Image (cartoon, rainbow, N blue to C red):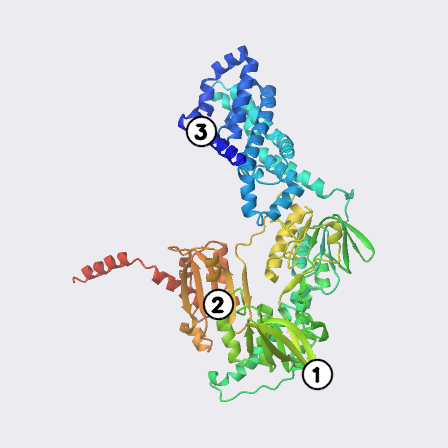
């Protein structure tokens, strides 16, 4: 009760003081104009009453800062102008810190218990961070103020940070900024005419004010680097400018860029050049999908005017073709090609031994920077009994030479859905099991329902809402035990494909020992520059996330390599604004930007424009007149927020929208662009036309109609 009364009294005092400040317009006395007009009077009073003037100034400064009132910056400048550099620096340095500490204590006394009691569970991570690194966080904010100082004072009061630590860090952290502002004040105090603003002293002070945030940021970077590199000795010279670990998409692009700008670069790969995309992912899967699609065309013979079409094939030969496709693409990612480009390719297992060294094949390589591009692997969930069977993943399914009789695909994402349809078309009896309510869960419900119905029509058994619990082998039969609506469901299989996602490769090559930070997602933590907590160690591709696509790996690699090589002079933040992707089922599903589900979840206003591909001449001629284009736009504008295309060649057709969104081109620009007739690309123009019709200027058209009637003499 006593504490509550004290809080009420303190609140009333603060309220009265703040209201008085604004009611009596006391802020007018804390402006440069007023202080300049009274400078002579203040100076004379100061000469006669030095200690009293300094004491009053000190007290007012503490009160203004403690109450978070506007005017502290002006008072700092005024202090420099009235008292001179050293006196003002001494007074302001302590007054600002004491005032900030009072604000900190008031915030803590009035609000911390309530905030922590109500939001403690949500603030757990912040509290732990403050307890561990609170001094450094505060020092960073003081040195490079991202937020106003009064906000920092109040927010820090809500955390577990010790008062003594807050005071000491604030005293040190604000000192550099105080020097700059006080110096500027001394120069302004000497200004006697408008011409004086061009004096060297004034100009230098303004330059200091302008560049101080940049200098402070650089100093902070040095402190951070010293802290993270503590215990590691940097070599005097380096063997390489860049060492890249992993020769998948991200590693290949990183090393290519480095070689192109004449840096000395080493690329280390322990398995196969090209990574997952070439060997076990994009290339083989699309080759298999293409073969399976040929069979689907044969089954649709009557649609194309043929009475009957039959295809004889050997599954082993189909898989051999897949392997041949991989081999045909291999030279693009080969050791020979990259060696010719100027990359030193090393086959072996890398271990990062320090921020500047990588060990491979018993040899220690020293390097200015490192890029981690180790990719990801199939995630295998801990399902009881799974180890009793020889389950398949996207890594080893390409070794098959006998068509699975009964294939269960565990997972309804892009990989699972693509392989589900491909193997069903090749003749396997396929059951797809997905624990969520829909397959392709990242897409709108209508999209997943459309694809699922296509699967069902092709004879695939799709089990959504089925959680895999156990694998059993009973009397020679292999069973996947699932739970659905509280009931047990048994699914028999001869082959089981686990396709429930991918897990970043973060272990076994030195990250743990070095202390490279790992995110909650299980990927390497990176900042917007693609740097880890070690400023010279970067990361790109699946191992970094958040997108596990080949094209985003290449995208990230550009930023990682350029920042690794030139970041000390100019750095670039990775741009995730426009990320496209496609699932290569039949029909294909391609998307960029928001879909309806995401827009609603994020409460982003939008309008929907649709175009049915069944209306498109070329699609009709090809007997591919199914699917749609759905565009989300900003209400009342042609600005594109997101696009989903469901239909044949959707992945290719999406590119026009990706370009438009990247360079802020609206639907009017697409509508005004000539598209070749008859092509599938016309669907983009037709969709833009539908948007235009829905936004036609009806009132203007009414007047135009009257104009034409007048022209006819009607």
Q: Is residue 458 above or below residue 608?
A: below
| Label 3 Cα crowd, 10 Å radius (few <14 / some 14-19 / many 20+) | few
Can I make out residue 204 in this image?
Answer: no
The residues tagged by marks 3 and 1 sit, at their Cα atoms, a distance apart of 84 Å
Q: Earlier in the sequence, mark 1 or mark 2?
A: 2
Query: Which secondary structure lies at badge 1?
Result: loop
User: What x and y, as percent, mark residue 197?
Assistant: 50, 23
Residue bearing the label numbered 3: 16
Label disc, if present, on residue 210 of the rendered structure: none
> Label 1 crowding class (10 Å Cα cut-off): few <14, some 14-19, many 20+?
few
Residue 154, given in percent of the width and then of the height, sits at 54, 37
Quadrant in the rendering for residue 104: top right
Q: Which residue is mark 1?
A: 476
Q: Residue 454 versus residue 539: which sits nearer the camera?
A: 454
Q: Secondary structure at mark 2?
A: helix
Looking at the picture, tell me which residue is in the foreground, 412 or 664.
412
Q: Which tag, 3 or 2, sits closer to the chain's start?
A: 3
**Cα gap from disc 1 to disc 2, whole angstroms:** 39 Å
Question: Which residue is disc 2 drawn over?
Answer: 445
Mark 3 or 1 closer to N-term? 3
- Left or right of 661 on screen, residue 382: right
Residue depicted at 57% across the width and 76% down the height = 421
Nearest-to-viewer mark from 1 and 2: 1
């Amino acid at each position: 009760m006593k504490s509550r009364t004290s809080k009420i009294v303190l609140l009333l005092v603060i309220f009265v003081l703040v209201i008085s400040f604004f009611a009596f317009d006391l802020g007018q006395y804390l402006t440069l104009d007023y202080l300049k007009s009274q400078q002579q009077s203040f100076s004379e009073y100061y000469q006669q009453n030095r200690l009293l003037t300094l004491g009053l100034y000190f007290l007012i400064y503490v009160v203004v800062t403690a109450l978070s009132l506007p005017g502290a910056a002006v008072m700092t400048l005024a202090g420099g102008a009235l008292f001179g550099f050293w006196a003002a620096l001494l007074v302001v340095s302590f007054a600002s810190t004491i005032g900030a500490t009072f604000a900190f204590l008031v915030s803590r006394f009035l609000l911390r218990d309530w905030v922590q009691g109500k939001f403690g569970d949500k603030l757990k991570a912040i509290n732990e961070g403050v307890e561990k690194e609170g001094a450094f966080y505060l020092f960073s904010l003081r040195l490079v103020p991202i937020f106003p100082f009064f906000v920092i004072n109040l927010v820090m009061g809500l955390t577990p940070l010790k008062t003594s630590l807050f005071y000491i860090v604030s005293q040190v952290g604000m000192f550099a900024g105080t020097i700059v502002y006080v110096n500027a004040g001394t120069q302004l105090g000497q200004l006697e005419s408008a011409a004086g603003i061009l004096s060297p002293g004034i100009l230098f002070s303004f330059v200091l004010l302008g560049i101080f945030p940049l200098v402070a940021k650089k100093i902070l970077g040095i402190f951070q680097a010293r802290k993270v590199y503590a215990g590691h000795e940097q070599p005097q010279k380096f063997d390489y400018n860049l060492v890249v670990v992993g020769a998948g998409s991200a590693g290949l692009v990183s090393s290519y860029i480095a070689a192109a700008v004449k840096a000395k670069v080493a690329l280390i790969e322990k398995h196969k050049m090209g990574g997952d995309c070439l060997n076990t992912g994009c290339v083989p899967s699309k080759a298999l999908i293409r073969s399976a699609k040929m069979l689907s065309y044969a089954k649709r013979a009557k649609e194309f005017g043929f009475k009957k079409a039959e295809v004889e094939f050997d599954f082993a030969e189909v898989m051999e073709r897949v392997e041949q496709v991989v081999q045909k693409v291999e030279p693009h990612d080969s050791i020979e090609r990259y060696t010719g480009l100027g990359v030193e390719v090393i086959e072996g297992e890398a271990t990062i031994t320090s921020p500047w060294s990588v060990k491979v094949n018993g040899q220690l390589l020293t390097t200015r920077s490192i890029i981690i591009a180790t990719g990801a692997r199939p995630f295998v969930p801990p399902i009881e009994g799974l180890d009793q069977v020889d389950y398949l993943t996207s890594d080893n399914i390409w070794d098959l030479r006998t068509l699975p009789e009964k294939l269960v695909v565990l997972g309804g994402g892009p990989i699972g859905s693509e392989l589900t349809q491909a193997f069903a078309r090749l003749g396997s009896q396929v059951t797809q099991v997905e624990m969520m309510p829909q397959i392709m869960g990242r897409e709108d419900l209508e999209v997943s329902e459309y694809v699922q119905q296509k699967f069902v029509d092709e004879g695939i058994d799709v089990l959504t809402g089925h959680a895999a619990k156990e694998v059993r082998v009973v009397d020679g039969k292999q069973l996947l035990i699932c739970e659905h609506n509280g009931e047990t469901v048994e699914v028999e299989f001869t082959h089981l494909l686990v396709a429930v996602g991918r897990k970043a490769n973060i272990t076994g090559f030195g990250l743990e020992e070095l202390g490279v930070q790992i995110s909650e997602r299980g990927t390497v933590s990176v900042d917007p520059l693609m740097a880890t907590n070690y400023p010279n160690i970067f990361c790109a591709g699946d191992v970094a996330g958040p997108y596990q696509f080949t094209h985003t790996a290449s995208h990230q690699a550009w930023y990682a390599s350029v920042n690794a090589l030139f970041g000390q002079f100019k750095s670039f933040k990775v741009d995730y604004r426009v990320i496209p992707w496609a699932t290569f089922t039949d029909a294909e599903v391609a998307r960029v930007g928001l879909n309806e589900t995401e827009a609603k979840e994020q409460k982003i206003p939008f309008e929907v424009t649709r175009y049915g591909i069944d209306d498109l001449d070329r699609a009709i001629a090809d007997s591919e007149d199914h699917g749609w284009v759905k565009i989300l736009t900003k209400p009342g504008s042609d600005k594109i927020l997101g696009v989903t295309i469901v239909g044949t060649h959707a992945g290719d057709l999406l590119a026009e929208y990706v370009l438009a969104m990247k360079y802020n081109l609206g639907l009017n620009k697409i509508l005004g662009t000539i598209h070749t007739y008859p092509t599938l690309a016309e669907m983009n123009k037709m969709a833009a036309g539908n948007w235009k019709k829905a936004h036609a200027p009806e009132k203007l058209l009414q007047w135009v109609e009257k104009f034409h009637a007048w022209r006819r003499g009607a």
